[in-house]
Amino acid sequence: MTWHVAEEDLRAYAQGELSPPLLWSADAHLTGCAECRTRLAEAADPVALDAAWARLDAELDAPRPSLLERMLVRLGVADHTARLLAATPVLRGSWLLSVLFLLVMTVLAVRLADQPALFLALAPLLPLAGVALSYGPSLDPTYEMAVVAPTHGFRLLMIRTVAVLTAGLACNGLATLALPGYGLLALAWLLPAFALTATGLALTARLGPVLGPSLVGVAWVTVLAVAGVRTPPHDTLAPFTAAGQGAAATVAVLAGLLLHRARDRFDTRPLGGFPADGAG
């Protein structure tokens, strides 16, 4: 091989300043010329070369952002916040498909038995369960990331809650469209859903991300059971009447106020993270 890359071209190549078509020619030549590769190694800045290799290693080792994460970043969400949101368990396809399957089965049962109370009882529990599964060291796979993230714990709580509620309410809304014959009654789950979720979050600050929402779920089932015993057949259960909807709205507002007052608890726990189960 009688031709070699010129010295000034090698220096420009090493600094990333060589432009086409000389760049293409140098690339092709260096693959087959050991002498020019040796000269290139001598011309390269070892500090810059080590930094380039480090950047390459970091890029290769970094996990590829998911579609949801890329969409959040495009919408202006900070990288670390988008990563925490995208890792939320209930925003993954498996959870969403499970929720949709459960809702479809419930809607079919309502259509066959003509009992909308079945759907109205289940729908508020799904957002509560989704939010409960998003926090805590035993439930959140990104708990350690949340602890060290440069984000106020309460702010992160609200961001995730909004994301989970959006997904959960959207699923419930699709199921509601399949029950047009019940009119506004098919939407009577909405205020209880906000009430249950807000109460569950308020109790999370004191009782933890499992016990707090679990108690709220048990209380909801108990209220429905008592209402079912006291309500005549084919009448609307008390929680889904106008008075019951007003009570749900009141509970949601009060629970929201309590949650706001307890907001600092999400930053004063051990390790700076969300409260552990049973912590007071």
Image: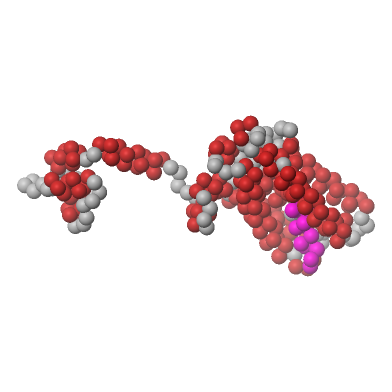
Height in image: 34 above or below 189?
A: above
Tell me if 191 is positioned left or right of 131 in this view: right
Height in image: 133 above or below 77?
A: above
The colour scheme used to paint the residues is: secondary structure
Q: Which residues are magenta?
A: 183-195
Question: Which residue is at the far left?
Answer: 2
Tell me if 119 is positioned left or right of 157 in this view: right
- Residue 274, quarter of picture: top right
Across and down, in percent, residue 81 comes to: 54, 47
Residue nearer the viewer, 170 or 20: 20
Specify the quadrant that holds the C terminus.
top right
Numbered label tally: 0
Height in image: 247 above or below 30?
A: below
Residue nearer the viewer, 54 or 217: 54
- Residue 38, quarter of picture: top left
Q: Main secondary structure of the magenta part?
A: helix
Residue occupying the point 35% across, 42% down: 56
Across and down, in percent, residue 238 comes to: 88, 56
Residue 34 in view (yes/no): no
Across and down, in percent, residue 210 comes to: 71, 38
Residue 75 in view (yes/no): yes
Q: Does the magenta-highlighted stretch encompass residue 191?
A: yes
Across and down, in percent, residue 106 comes to: 74, 55
Residue occupying the point 39% across, 43% down: 59
Residue nearer the viewer, 156 or 61: 156
Q: Does the magenta-highlighted stretch encompass residue 193?
A: yes
Residue occupying the point 16% across, 49% down: 9
